[in-house]
Image (cartoon, rainbow, N blue to C red):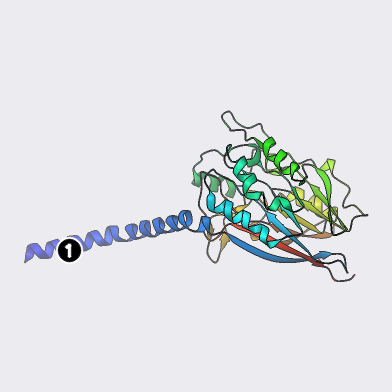
Amino acid sequence: MPTTGAGSATMDGMRARYGVPLGITAVGAAGLAYAAGFEVRSFRLRRVSVPVLPPGMRPLRVLQVSDIHMVGGQRKKQRWLQSLAGLRPDFVINTGDNLSDPEGVPETLDALGPLMEFPGAYVFGSNDYYGPKLRNPARYLMEKANGRHGLNGNAPAVGVIHNPWEELRDGFDSAGWVNLTNTRGSLKIDGHDIALTGLDDPHIKRDRYAEVTGGPRQDADFSMAVVHAPYLRVLDAFTADQYPLILAGHTHGGQLCIPFYGALVTNCDIDTQRVKGLSTHRAGGHRSYLHVSAGCGTNRYTPVRFACPPEVTLLTLTPRDRD
């Protein structure tokens, strides 16, 4: 009996010592399995209405696609993107980071093929130009939390993979999509002239606002701005120039979020409260609507999402109240 009592005491001590850590480990493993096995493939369509059109203009349905980060073999993502053509949007805006694999261009163009039957426009993100690198996720979170973003305008380090972005550009251009790389463009939608102003990716300091400054075209029926990464310098410039709507992506909505709290990082200098969805931005005495897509993919080396499912957004632009 004494021996049995001693053994029970020993077992109780081991449970007390190791039970909580093991429980935490089990919960963490279950969360990782969910984030990597289910949520990252739980594609969603989000619908948003934005009152930005001139009074009397008919509503426009804009499908924003962002941060696909295509990797070979992602069949479910490809089929889902193809199915979005059934929404029949008036036009499509692609806000960049289509690639996460230098071999991913054919599958990206195939996935977007049905959507390229509609009018559209695009900008590129850093991952269209350069392949991702394997990094410690904890280091990534710490760098972003401390305000370090992007390549800071420097040339990519030795060993960085250059993606075949020219092939992607040629595919979009051949479909008639408008390239908005530090330039202006326009779409004709049912006789309406939709003016678009775009920038290259601010995350790697390829944006050149001086090349597009001057504000919206006064002779257009409606004007909007497009950029991959919603850095404050870009949002300030577009808003001060009185663009009523800015579309961006890049943030992945935080990607790893805490339920009932939200994102920990934004991967740029925008605040976490505006890491995804519709908000407003003020600068120069003016206000613009800002929509940041949480995107529908991830870096190939961090294929997880938690409390932030992959998404595409259908924005319905409606007339604003009369002044």
Which residue is the extreme one toward the top?
158
Q: Is residue 189 left or right of residue 304?
A: right
Residue at image position (40%, 58%) is 30
* Residue 98 seen from this side: no
Q: Which residue is drawn at 56% across and 54% down?
A: 255
- Whether residue 73 sits left or right of residue 189 in the image: it is left
Counting from the top left corner in percent of width and height, residue 292 is at 68, 56
Q: Mark 1 points at which residue?
A: 9
Label 1: element kind: helix
Name the outermost residue toward the right: 219
Is 82 situated left or right of 231 in this image? Answer: left
- State which quarter of the image contains the C terminus: bottom right
Looking at the picture, how far across and down is residue 1, in whole percent? Answer: 6, 66
Q: How crowded is mark 1: few (under 14 residues within 10 Å), some or many (20 or more)?
A: few
Residue 47, picture quadrant = bottom right
Name above or below for residue 247 compared with residue 259. Answer: above
Q: Which residue is drawn at 39% across and 55% down?
A: 29
Point 16% across, 64% down: residue: 8
Give the image quarter of residue 223: bottom right
Give the mark count: 1
Tell which of 276 and 68 is nearer to you: 68
Q: Outermost residue, left direction? A: 1
Note whether 207 is above or below 76 in the view shown. Answer: above
Q: Which percent across, then down, holds residue 118?
A: 74, 54
Residue type indicated by callout 1: Ala
79 horizontally vs 210: left or right:
left
Residue 196 in sight: yes
Residue 247 in the image: x percent, y percent?
73, 54
